[in-house]
Image (cartoon, rainbow, N blue to C red):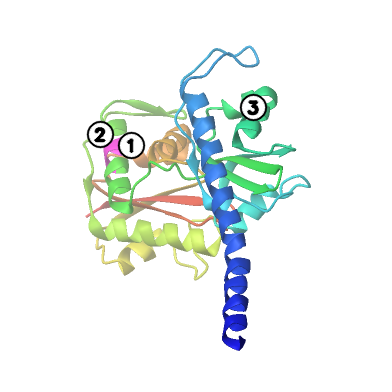
Amino acid sequence: MRHAVRSTRFVSLCLLILTPLFTETAHASEERQLVAAINDYRAHPQRCDRRPAQRLAPLALKSNLALPIGYGYGGGLRETLKSSGYSAVAVRSIRIVGAEDADEAFDRLQDRYCGALLDAQYADIGISRSRGEWQVVLAQPVLDSRVGDNRSVGKALLAEVNAARARPRMCGRQRFAAARPLSWNPALGAAAQGHSKAMAYGNYFAHRDPDGDMPADRARAAGYRGRQIGENIAAGQSSPGKAMAGWLASPGHCANLMNPMFTQVGAGFASEARSDEGVYWTMVFGAP
């Protein structure tokens, strides 16, 4: 009898432990079902708020956007997301109360918030649920999800700068003729990448780093022995193309890009969600 009692208690204990797991699994399934419904709606949209129907890319489900219910209604949502490792350019939180399942939650979202669901700026989504209360967080990350690693970004920036140099250009009031293409220099690339990382992790934005070093100092430290150095930096742009567009729109940065004296270049970027700007870009020019 004593053995039977112990077995019964053991079975009961297992059931008590597993019950929350079943609940969490069910909730996760419902959350994925809601995301699928939203993405299907974005793929086959109907008219909403007098805006024309437009097929949109699916939202990516991100666990660090699944905030505890109630976050985002008293301000500070972006700071909360930063602490979870997500840096957002745009973010919106929507709360639904009284929906018993994903179908009902979607119906309410479509009825009341179709404009948010069909907003092309959002790329990611997070969903939290507590009984009949749902929270949907829509966000656009600072760094475009299509941006690859530093090597691919370097190639993209090299192509961008050489495309810009291939034709005459006005940089502010200064006219530049077309210039010959730049070649990639690994030492300049290392200097650029190092400075981007230093700015991202040190949360600052400047040509002079906290140790007092300037672009020429960093280039020499990386092994570059050229006689002329120039540097462009940018912060907050979500892609290489946007960083380049910002430089071309600035007379001083544009002049660096078009300067015929420069023959070599290196570039890099770094992102850190907890920094003020989220992503930092550096391009270093040189002439041997």
Reading the chain from its start, which is encountered first: label 1 or label 2? 2
How far apart are the two marked residues, 3 and 2, measured between alpha carbons? 57 Å
Name the amino acid, label 3.
Answer: Asp
Q: Quick one: label 3 or label 2, which is nearer the N terminus?
A: 3
Label pair 1/2, CB-CB below 8 angstroms:
yes
Question: x and y percent of residue 160 in the render?
Answer: 31, 36
Q: Which residue bears the numbered disc 1?
A: 258
Q: Is residue 248 above or below residue 236?
A: above
- Image quadrant of residue 91? top right
User: Which residue has dot 2 on it?
Assistant: 179
Residues at marks 1 and 3 touching, judged by CB atoms closer than 8 Å: no
From mark 1 to mark 2, how far is it between C-alphas?
7 Å
Q: Which mark is residue 38?
A: none
Q: Mark 3 highlights which residue? A: 107
Residue 29 location (% of width, % of height):
52, 46
Query: Which image quarter is the N terminus in?
Result: bottom right
Which portion, as a residue range, is magenta? Answer: 158-162
Name the N-terminal-most of marks 1 and 3: 3
Judging depth in this view, the residue of 155 and 16 nearest the camera is 16
